[in-house]
Amino acid sequence: MPGFALDLVASRNLASCRQKLLRGGSRPQHIAGACRAQGTTDFAALSPSEAIVADPVLSEPSTSAPTPIVRSKNWPKKSSLYILRTDGKSCSRELVTGTGKLHFAYPSTQQHLLVWRHRPKSVMVIMKLGDELLQPFLEVIDFLGREHNLRVVVEPHVYEQFLRGRPGYPYAYTFTPSDKDRLAEYVDFVVCIGGDGVILHSSCLFKHSMPPVIAFNMGSMGFLTNHDFANFKRDLMDVIYGGQKLDSCTLLSLDSVNSMDEPGNSLGVMVTLRMRLVCEIWRKGGSGPEQSVEVLNEMVIDRGSSAFLTNIECYEKGRFIARVQADGIMLATPTGSTAYSVAAGGSMVHPNVPAILLTPVCPHSLSFRPIILPDYAELELRIPSNARCTAWVCFDGRSRQELGRGDSIKVRMSENPVPTINRTDLTSDWFDSLERCFRWSDRTVQKPLELGDGRVAIEGTGRDMNGGRS
């Protein structure tokens, strides 16, 4: 039989075997026994209509149920193969083991180490609105500008309110609205002082490429701001000069290490590449997007002040997937999974998981549960022409505007992540934030069963913790 090596005894009379098969005197499974008796080795020469499965163990026909057996030592080796992992822009070949078993060559996302090829020259410092954090703000810019000779860039309203005319800050600069789109070309890294809202604000300032961000927790919750301001000098020095030796970091590929000018002397800090979403507003009848916004947390469409439920059609790459009848719907990033999305019943997703979260807000359907989509999903949320009311959209809680009937929002993964500098490593920082902000899994510890005399029962054993019978 083509493709299989069969264990057969030599025979020369192939014609006799064929005739015996065609007469029906033997079952196809037992034709090997007949061939063994006649002495043929050209078993594969049988025509496709005479295809058989050999039973080299049984030499005579049997009235019992056939049991086809092929000795594994004579099986042909499986065909070799390989896997191409592709993201639409590049692909890499993943090796398969010698036995043909598939395996992952590497995790989907690994830890990232930020290493400067040259010492940073410019830093942008952003603080929470108001003057309650003015003193910490001045301490930070003085440390960076005076002690480490960095050019410090601040927002125009901060410069006008706190620094213009104030002596002793010659290293402080600001920018004009026309220069805003080019900030990423000149700012090496960003320092945020405040809460999570400051990080969201910094993401809005850099609409495309985003410099690394280090955030100090001076706000209310601070899920994304893991750094303690009491250690700001040490943490900022780690960013400027590196806090971890590159040659001791096992998470970088060898090619990355060899690409450095002096890998043995290079230092860096751990960063998290936080995914953003590109959200485009398409108006009815328009030939292109009216506006494009990148969000770090989520994009939300809701019914606003209307008394009616929203009626939204959901498409993925042009294919209809769902009709939303709810107070609203949101598309969130893994970073945003611990914000509005979790409050609406969505899952909390680790920032390294490449995903887009689709979370309905108070859906009028018991089966409409939140789902997690791959990051390559391309989604469209459209207001149908027969909807009872219009809808409203906002991006990271900002830029709220109305969507009319026939308007739609197209959402996909952004090519520009937000690199946030870790305090320790990504996973430790994330679990620390879950415990610190949400008291995740926190519960009063269950008390053991007391048997008296200081003994404690162990369930299912019939014994106490001292080994005695309970």
Image (spheres, rainbow, N blue to C red):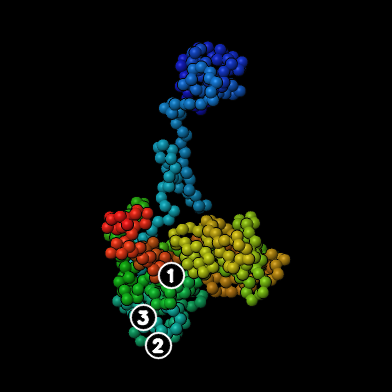
* Crowd band around label 1 with a 10 angstrom C-alpha radius: few (<14), some (14–19), many (20+): few
Q: Nearer the viewer, residue 84 or 150?
A: 84
Q: Nearer the viewer, residue 143 or 274?
A: 274
Q: Nearer the viewer, residue 223 or 177?
A: 223
Q: Quadrant of residue 113?
A: bottom left
Residue 386 percent across, percent down from the top left: 72, 66
**Disc nearer the start of the sequence (3/2):** 3
- Distance from label 3 to label 2 (Cα)? 19 Å
Query: In the drawing, what numbered circle is on residue 136?
Result: 3
Instruction: Name the residue beneath numbered marker 1.
Output: 438
Q: Nearer the viewer, mark 2 or mark 1?
A: 1
Query: In the drawing, what numbered circle is on residue 215?
Result: none
148 relative position to 195: left or right: left
Residue 390 percent across, percent down from the top left: 67, 71
Mark 3: secondary structure: helix
Residue located at (48% from left, 51% from top): 90
Whether residue 23 is visible: yes
Asked if marks 1 and 3 touch (Cβ < 8 Å), the reply is: no
Instruction: Name the residue beneath numbered marker 2.
Output: 165
Asked if marks 3 and 2 touch (Cβ < 8 Å), the reply is: no
* Crowd band around label 2 with a 10 angstrom C-alpha radius: few (<14), some (14–19), many (20+): few
47 relative position to 261: left or right: right
Q: Amino acid under label 3?
A: Pro
248 relative position to 378: left or right: left
Vertical comparison of 233 with 131: above or below: above
Q: Amino acid under label 2?
A: Gly
Vertical comparison of 160 with 31: above or below: below
Residue 293 percent across, percent down from the top left: 55, 68
